[in-house]
Image: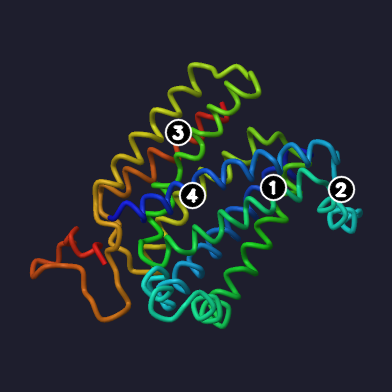
Amino acid sequence: MTFRKYLVLAAVTVFGATGDSLLSRGMKQSGNISLHQLPDLILTILNPWILTGILFLLGFFAAYMIALSWADLTYVLPATSLGYVLLALIAKFLLHEQVTATRWLGIILISIGVGFVTRGPALTHDPGIRQPENCNGEPVSTSVEL
Amino acid sequence: MKQLYTWGAVAAIVLASTIGDVLLSRAMKQVGDVGELWRSHGLLAVVGRTLRNVNFVLGILAMTVAFYSLLIGLSWGDVSLVAPASASLTFVATAVAAKIFLHERVDPHRWMAALLVAGGVALLAA
């Protein structure tokens, strides 16, 4: 893993968390939506919070696609789940919500999980020419240095 | 009744986003390393190659379904329930789907990671 690739994973995390909080704020403003008012759902996109949220989520998506082009899905998803930790920190320090002991425990679990996956190889199956494994069929972590 | 709707939305989000993630991951593996392609062929070539990929288009479709399910779900239930519940279940569902459909080597470390993250996300909602 190069520094640039860690930067892409960080972008996935930050853009995703910011986009989700903006969407949540916008949807709280527009109120409940029922199934027989589905056209209203299209109008909610005009809400500035939703619009900004969607822009951030587009940035998230671009970074996510770049990450998926060189890493496994089961690597990218846990590695970028630090976004939930970021969300909880935003909630505590920017929105002054109370973060309970249970939530801190959740944050710790996620962080351990992220540590578990990022120590391993980023890519274990390559549909192309390269086979990132040695003769024992074990993944070789150096093969991710493209 | 509203709770049933909320969990129905959660189920729809999990199913649609798992299908979407698998399709998008497959698409980007077919496109190839974006950084390398960008340097050798330019940004437009990368974008064009991605947009013309069938799996990418289908993946976007699935993600659109997931996104609208999320918007509907958020209007029925609390964001602190809907978002973590669907994300938590999606982590486990994608780990299984990636192993079956993408032939990724989901070793014990990755199962642990998926379960820890799923459990952690669930705790955030509690």
Which residue is label 2 attached to? A34
Q: Are marks 1 and 2 in contact (CB under 8 Å)?
A: no
Same subunit: marks 2 and 3: no
Residue B120's tag is 3
| Residue A109 figure quarter | top left
* Quadrant in the picture for residue A36: bottom right
Q: Which residue shows up at 25% across the image and 49% down it?
A: B108
> Distance between the Cα atoms at labels 1 and 2?
22 Å
Residue at the image point whose x is 32% and y is 48% from the top: B111
Q: Quadrant of the C terminus of chain B?
A: top right
Whole-percent x and y of residue A136?
9, 66
Residue holding disc 4:
A11
In whole angstroms, how far apart are the C-alphas of marks 4 and 2? 34 Å
Q: Given the image, on which type of amino acid does mark 4 rest? A: Ala
Judging by the rendered image, the residue that carries numbered circle 1 is A53
Can you say whether B84 is above or below B27 in the image? above
Where is residue A79? Give x, y as percent.
Answer: 39, 47
Which chain hosts label 3? B
